[in-house]
């Protein structure tokens, strides 16, 4: 068995400043065109869109997409839509939680019959 993969090279590491610069570019393109910032940044900086998406979700650079209740801070029409989407998501999550409680009560009463 070979250990050739053990010492495989790792991908390039980006500083926080570089990440913030790339996310700022994404935000700028999104503000100007409404969308496409991640794609444009991926092509310009030769970085995987998944990597950029990960940075955005983690809140690097100020341009953040909302994850599990975190506030949105994306500018322009996309930011407004994301805020509304997050609010709807939060409403749905609350309704599902309430529905779960109701189902538990219903099943308890049903089993008591």
Image: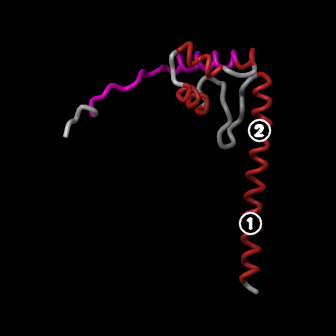
Q: Nearer the viewer, residue 42 or 96?
A: 42
Q: Nearer the viewer, residue 23 or 49?
A: 49
Q: Nearer the viewer, residue 36 or 92?
A: 36
Q: Which residue is mark 2?
A: 85
Picture coordinates of residue 71 (x, y %)?
Answer: 71, 35
Residue at screen point 54% across, 29% down: 50
In the rendered view, would you say 101 is above or below 91? Answer: below
Residue at screen point 69% across, 16% down: 29
Give yes or no for residue 18 being in the magenta stretch: yes
Q: How is the image coloured?
A: secondary structure
Picture coordinates of residue 79 (x, y %)?
Answer: 76, 27
For the N terminus, which image quadrant?
Answer: top left
In the rendered view, would you say 94 is above or below 31? Answer: below
Residue at screen point 75% across, 33% down: 82
Q: Which residue is mark 1?
A: 101
How dense is the environment of label 2, judged by Cα within 10 Å: few (below 14), some, or many (20 and up)?
Answer: few
Residue at screen point 58% across, 15% down: 21
Q: Secondary structure at mark 2?
A: helix
Give yes or no for residue 68 being in the magenta stretch: no
Picture coordinates of residue 96 (x, y %)?
Answer: 74, 57
Q: How many marks?
A: 2
**Residue 27 shown left or right of residue 7 in the figure:** right
For the C terminus, which image quadrant?
Answer: bottom right
Which comes before the other along the chain, label 1 or label 2?
2
Q: Secondary structure at mark 1?
A: helix
* Magenta-colored span: 6-29
Report which quarter residue 76 is drawn in: top right
């Amino acid at each position: 068995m070979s250990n050739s993969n053990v010492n495989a090279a790792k991908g390039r590491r980006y500083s926080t400043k570089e990440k913030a610069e790339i996310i700022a570019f994404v935000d700028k393109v999104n503000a100007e065109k409404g969308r496409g910032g991640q794609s444009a940044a991926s092509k310009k900086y030769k970085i995987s869109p998944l990597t950029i998406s990960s940075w955005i979700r983690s809140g690097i650079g100020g341009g953040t997409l909302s994850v599990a209740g975190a506030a949105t801070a994306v500018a322009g029409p996309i930011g407004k839509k994301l805020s509304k989407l997050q609010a709807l998501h939060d409403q749905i999550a609350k309704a599902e939680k309430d529905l779960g409680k109701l189902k538990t009560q219903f099943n308890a009463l049903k089993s008591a019959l």
